[in-house]
Image (cartoon, rainbow, N blue to C red):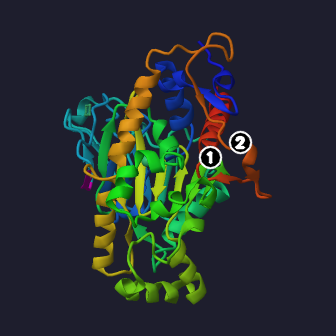
């Protein structure tokens, strides 16, 4: 059955069956995750030739590997003989990939190098490489791939807004480079994957779902954004276009380094190194503004000092995997502090992700069993996303900006989703 996504996704509401319909999920894996750009990993995760990590693009397992030329390949994690999965671990370092079923051996670029008992091999080795992503590209070390090879350029996908979000994060490093080398923690959640692009960029729920965090940490800077109430809160929700969104907390910060939770005297060397890199004025602004809180469509969350991937497993299951940024060119104590901060925010016993996970699972239960509307808008199960529509504004550069509690970001996600799902039908 061909769905009309325009029927299910209106400008001010979407239908809950989009979270629960397995046929919708199958469409998404093809139209969004196979035919569009997807975040895969960071080049710091595979520093030397032969270093690899396993990831997924949609439902397909892939190997992101540093090849012998210094480039990064994204290979299907599936033997070209009969399809056995090649790598089982999350990371490793190898000269070659050897399949344990019949011993075929592949190079770091996916080429078939050797076949066991080769007298009976009747094909040309050159015709039997591992499948590779059709396109691989990166921005400031963030590696994106696309299996179909027909997704246009990464620069177009990220747009000015997506690039700016990544740049603002990387510019906090005195070398301009961050590393994602502290390891990932995955939370398996019984919710549709789309709950996470929505809730990671939802500014309306902070003082409800995360109230326990504010009670435990009254000086948490999220508090600054919510404590004054709706009218006093000057943080913003931003639609950067292309499905990329941001909760811009910068207008609410009342002190420098609020995002790091320390005073300047504790990180004097870092402040000096940043000034040496960017000049004093720019460094001062970076120290005040800190990292962004943004989502890059469809699966990359830049959660201030954290980075998260959204890995769908099936229509009702997802893994939200996160790690922490490590800054190049700073002392080990500062990077340790970032790690501790991340554990408190997103780890299994933390303040933020466990609470968001419960909400995501309750959302999923809320829409379980609700059928798609038969004719247009009638019927139950609609999600209202109208909050703040009439008070959002559009900037000359196209961005839409509203109050942090407005559903600007949710509408941005869904409107881009609708465009992709309709245009790639
Ligand atoms: S399935 Fe890999 S060598 Fe046969
Ligand atoms: Fe949350």
Pinpoint residue 93: horizontal percent, then vertical percent. 25, 57
Instruction: Give whichever of discs 1 and 2 has the lower sequence position.
Output: 2
The answer to whether the residue labelled 1 contacts the one labelled 2, judged by CB atoms less than 8 Å apart, is yes
Which sits in the foreground, 413 or 199? 199
Which quadrant of the rendered structure holds the C terminus? Answer: top right
Q: Which residue is mark 2?
A: 389
In the figure, is residue 340 to the left or right of 254? Answer: left
Residue at coordinates 19% horizontally, 37% vertically from top-left? Answer: 100
Residue at coordinates 64% horizontally, 53% vertically from top-left? Answer: 403
Magenta extent: 91-95
Eyeballing the image, is 49 above or below 171? above
Pinpoint residue 14: horizontal percent, then vertical percent. 61, 28
* Neighbourhood count class around disc 2 (C-alpha, 10 Å): few under 14, some 14–19, many 20 upward: some
Residue at coordinates 23% horizontally, 41% vertically from top-left? Answer: 88
Eyeballing the image, is 242 above or below 20? below
Can residue 278 be seen from the camera position used here?
A: yes
Dot 1: element: loop
Q: Which residue is mark 1?
A: 406
Eyeballing the image, is 156 above or below 312? below
Quadrant of the rendered structure where residue 325 is?
bottom left
* Neighbourhood count class around disc 1 (C-alpha, 10 Å): few under 14, some 14–19, many 20 upward: many
Pinpoint residue 267: horizontal percent, then vertical percent. 37, 84
In the figure, is residue 41 to the left or right of 227? Answer: left
How many discs appear?
2
Can residue 48 be seen from the camera position used here?
A: no
Dot 2: element: helix
Q: Which mark identifies residue 165?
A: none
In the figure, is residue 130 to the left or right of 423? Answer: left
**Quadrant observed for ligand 1 in the rendered image:** top left
């Amino acid at each position: 059955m061909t769905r009309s996504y325009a029927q299910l996704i209106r400008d001010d509401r979407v239908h809950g069956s989009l979270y629960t319909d397995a046929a919708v999920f199958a469409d998404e894996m093809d139209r969004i995750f196979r035919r569009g750009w997807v975040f895969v990993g960071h080049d710091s995760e595979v520093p030397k030739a032969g270093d690899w990590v396993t990831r997924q693009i949609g439902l397909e397992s892939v190997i992101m590997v540093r090849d012998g030329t210094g480039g990064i390949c994204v290979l299907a994690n599936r033997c070209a003989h009969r399809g056995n999965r090649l790598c089982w671990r999350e990371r490793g370092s190898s000269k070659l990939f050897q399949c344990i079923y019949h011993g075929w051996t592949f190079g770091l670029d996916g080429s078939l190098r050797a076949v066991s008992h080769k007298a009976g091999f009747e094909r040309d080795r050159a015709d039997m490489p591992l499948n590779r992503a059709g396109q691989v590209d990166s921005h400031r070390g963030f590696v994106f791939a696309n299996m179909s090879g027909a997704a246009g350029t990464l620069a177009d996908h990220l747009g000015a807004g997506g690039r700016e979000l990544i740049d603002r994060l990387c510019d906090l490093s005195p070398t301009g480079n961050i590393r994602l080398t502290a390891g990932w923690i995955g939370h398996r959640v019984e919710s549709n994957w789309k709950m996470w692009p929505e809730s990671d960029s939802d500014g309306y729920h902070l003082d409800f779902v995360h109230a326990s965090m504010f009670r435990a940490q009254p000086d948490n800077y999220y508090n600054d954004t919510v404590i004054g109430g709706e009218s006093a809160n000057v943080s913003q929700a931003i639609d950067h276009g292309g499905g990329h969104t941001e909760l811009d907390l910068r207008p609410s910060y009342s002190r420098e380094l609020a995002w790091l939770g320390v005073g300047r005297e504790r990180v004097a060397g870092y402040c000096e190194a940043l000034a040496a890199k960017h000049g004093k004025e720019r460094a001062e602004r970076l120290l005040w503004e800190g990292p962004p809180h943004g989502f890059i469509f469809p699966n990359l969350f830049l959660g201030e000092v954290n980075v998260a991937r959204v890995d769908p497993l099936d229509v009702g299951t997802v893994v939200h995997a996160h790690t922490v940024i490590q800054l190049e060119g700073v002392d080990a104590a500062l990077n340790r502090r970032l790690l501790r901060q991340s554990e408190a925010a997103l780890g299994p016993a933390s303040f933020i992700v466990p609470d968001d996970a419960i909400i995501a699972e309750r959302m999923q239960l809320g829409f379980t069993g609700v059928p798609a509307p038969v004719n247009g808008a009638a019927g139950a199960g609609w999600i209202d996303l109208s909050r703040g529509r009439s008070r959002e504004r559009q900037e000359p550069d196209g961005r839409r900006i509203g109050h942090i509690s407005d559903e600007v970001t949710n509408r941005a996600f869904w409107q881009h989703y609708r465009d992709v799902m309709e245009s790639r039908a």
